[in-house]
Amino acid sequence: MDLSELRRQSLRDTLGITEAAFPRILTFVDFANVNHWFDDESYDLESVPLPEGRSVEIDIKRLKSFLDCFSTDVRFYYGHDPASTGSMAFTRAAKHAFGAHRVFTKRIQQIRHDLSSTDSVTNTRLVHSDDRGDFVWIPKCNFDVEISVDAMRLIRAYDTLCLLSGDADFAALVQHLKAKEGKKVILIKGGRIDGSLGRLLDLKIDASQVKSHVAQIKQKPGH
C-alpha cells in the first residue's frame, strides 16, 4: 500500500466512511452552502486562535483532493455572475479543479428585498432607493432541483449519496433514495441542520471534522 492509498484509507476509517459500509459513493457539492462553512471560524487549521485580519476559507483544490479519497465521482454546483470578473474566474478555477464536465453552473438571480424600518444594513452602499422606498438586491441561485434531478438520473451509478450541504429541501430526496431505492446517504455539513433531514441520514459529518483537509488560511481584504 503506497502513501496516498494509506492516507485515503486512514481518512475513510477516521470519518467512518468505510468501503464495506458505504460502497460506490457519488458526491454532490452544493458550494453555495459549503462556501460559508467557516465564516465565523475563530481558529486556524491547527486549532490556534486566528490572528487579526485572517480567515478560514474553503480551498477548492484541497476540497477535491479530500473528496477523491472516498468518492467514485464528484459533481460541483455553484452559480456565476457574468458581470463579475471574480465570479467568472472562480468558475474557471472550479472547472480546473473538478473537471469542466463536473462543474454545473447557472446565472445568479438578483432578488429585490424591500427594507422595513426595523431592518439593519451594516453596509449602506448596498442600499438602493426608489419611489417604493429603500431596498437591497439579494443574490439567489439554488441548485436543489438540479441536484435532485441528477441524483435520480444517475441512480444506477452509485450505492451511496454523499451530499455537501445542509439544505432541508433535500429531505424529500434523501427519504426517497433510502425508502424506495435502497441507497445510503452521507451528509457533510456546517452548523445545524433541520431535524427532518438529520433523522434520515446514515452518517453525518460536521465541517469541523474535515476543516484541516479542505480549508486554507487567507488574509481578509483590507488587511
Image: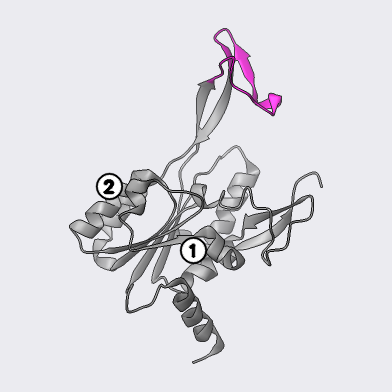
Task: Look at the numbered disc 1 and give the secondary structure of its residue.
Answer: loop
Q: Quadrant of residue 169?
A: top left
Q: Which residues are magenta?
A: 114-134
Residue 210: percent from the left, percent from the top? 54, 65
Residue 197: percent from the left, percent from the top? 34, 50
Q: If you read the primary sequence from the N terminus, does the residue marked by circle 1 or circle 2 appear first? A: 1
Q: Which residue is mark 2?
A: 172
The relative height of residue 20 versus residue 172 in the rendered view (above or below) is below
Asked whether, in this view, residue 73 is left or right of residue 66, the answer is left
Asked whether, in this view, residue 101 is left or right of residue 131, the answer is left
- The kind of residue tagged 2 is Ala
**Residue 101 visible in the current orientation:** no
Q: Residue at x 68, y 28 (%)?
A: 122
Q: Residue at x 51, y 50 (%)?
A: 191
Q: Which residue is mark 1?
A: 99
Q: Which label sits in the foreground, 1 or 2?
A: 2
Q: Residue at x 70, y 25 (%)?
A: 125
The relative height of residue 153 versus residue 135 in the rendered view (above or below) is below
**Residue 18 visible in the current orientation:** yes
Residue 130: say if magenta.
yes
The relative height of residue 23 versus residue 30 in the rendered view (above or below) is below
Q: Are marks 1 and 2 in contact (CB under 8 Å)?
A: no
Task: Look at the numbered disc 2 and give the secondary structure of its residue.
Answer: helix
